[in-house]
Amino acid sequence: MMNGVRQISFGLCVAVVSASACAAESADAGYPARPIRMLVPNAPGSSVDTLSRIIGNKMSEVIGQQLVVDNRAGAGGIVGMEIAKNAAPDGYTLISATTAASTVAVLLMKKPTFHPVTDYDHVSQFAVTANVLVVHPGQPVKSTKELIDLAKAKQLNMASAGAGSQSHLSGAYFMSVANIQSLHVPYKGGGPSVAAVLAGESQWTLTPAAAVMTHVNAGKLRAIGHSLPGKSALMGSIPPIAETIPGFDYSGWQGFMIPKGTPKPIIEKLRAAVIKTANLPEVKNLLIAQATEVVTGTPEDFRKVIADSLAKNAKVIKAIGLKAE
């Protein structure tokens, strides 16, 4: 009798598990059935926002549902990262993750509220972004060396997108290796920080290319260097900072993460859509106009990029003496 009860119980368990699995498989097969929220942990007009919209607009067509941009700026990207961590793992919340929000801001927290490697699932990287050193055209500066000389001769303001942003860390690192001091002026996002240089409030910034190339091409800002380790066709005639400061190399990446526990078939469907979208000729051309290179891969590839970036930025933060807040 007892054996019979056990067999019935086992059979019921199998039936329940099978039904759940079938339901999950069915949900995955119909995915996506409604618009997908794309969290952008930066303000509108920032480089992250620009690149996210380039990918998101076309990916909506590829995947068959709209990717709705949800800008959640604040605390160097921490606000958006926390929202993504706590969202339902159903495939309807993506976060457009970056070097700054994922591996810089978290290193500047005394009590980190997330870990970029272990607290999320990873979809795919889609871009590598150079930082560009720009000044207002009214400044008597036409090269990295001239900026260094001017900064040694007088007080200059360095604009950033806020504490822990990519422009903050890259600018601080630049000052450290160039042996100069400028007043760090943090703004609420990449758009306002670039606007400050356009208006002459701040004299320079070293910020992701997508935030400034439109202004550079329009003659409203002067680009005097970039952060890639050598000359790049993407950067045209803009020279690498490494020509003036040997070994200088500090660029960023961007890609999609998703709440931990999202079903693998959904992650794979999203990854395929990201790769197809990023490699469309019209998308590649839009990214090239922002001096951004398409780089895609597997979730494991992206996870390694994030882990390596976390280790590198920990060393940079220590070297330049930034403290957790």
Image (cartoon, rainbow, N blue to C red):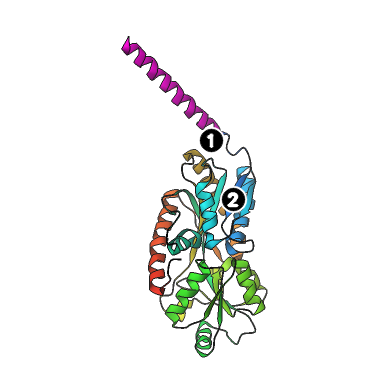
**Label number found at residue 196:** none
Q: Nearer the viewer, residue 306 or 246?
A: 306
Q: CA distance from mark 2 to mark 1?
A: 19 Å
**Which residue shows up at 49% across the image and 38% down it?**
265
Whether residue 7 is in magenta: the answer is yes
Residue for point 65% across, 84% down: 138
User: In the rendered image, which residue does mark 2 sit on?
Assistant: 38
Quadrant of residue 205 in the image? bottom right
In the image, taking residue 47 as reference, residue 15 lies left or right, namely left
For badge 2, the amino acid type reads: Met
Residue extending farthest bottom = 153
User: Residue 286 in the image: x percent, y percent?
Assistant: 62, 61
Q: Dot 1, crowdedness within 10 Å: few (<14), some or many (≥20)?
A: some
Against 168, residue 153 (above or below) is: below
- 186, 133: nearer the viewer: 186
Mark 1 belongs to which amino acid?
A: Asp
Position above or below: 134 against 56: below
299 shown above or below 229: above
How crowded pointer 2 is (Cα within 10 Å; few <14, some 14-19, many 20+) is rated as: many
| Magenta region | 1-29
Q: Which residue is mark 1?
A: 28
- Is mark 2 in CB contact (under 8 Å) with mark 1? no
| Vertical placement of residue 80 versus 228, above or below | above
Residue 183 appears in the picture as rendered: yes
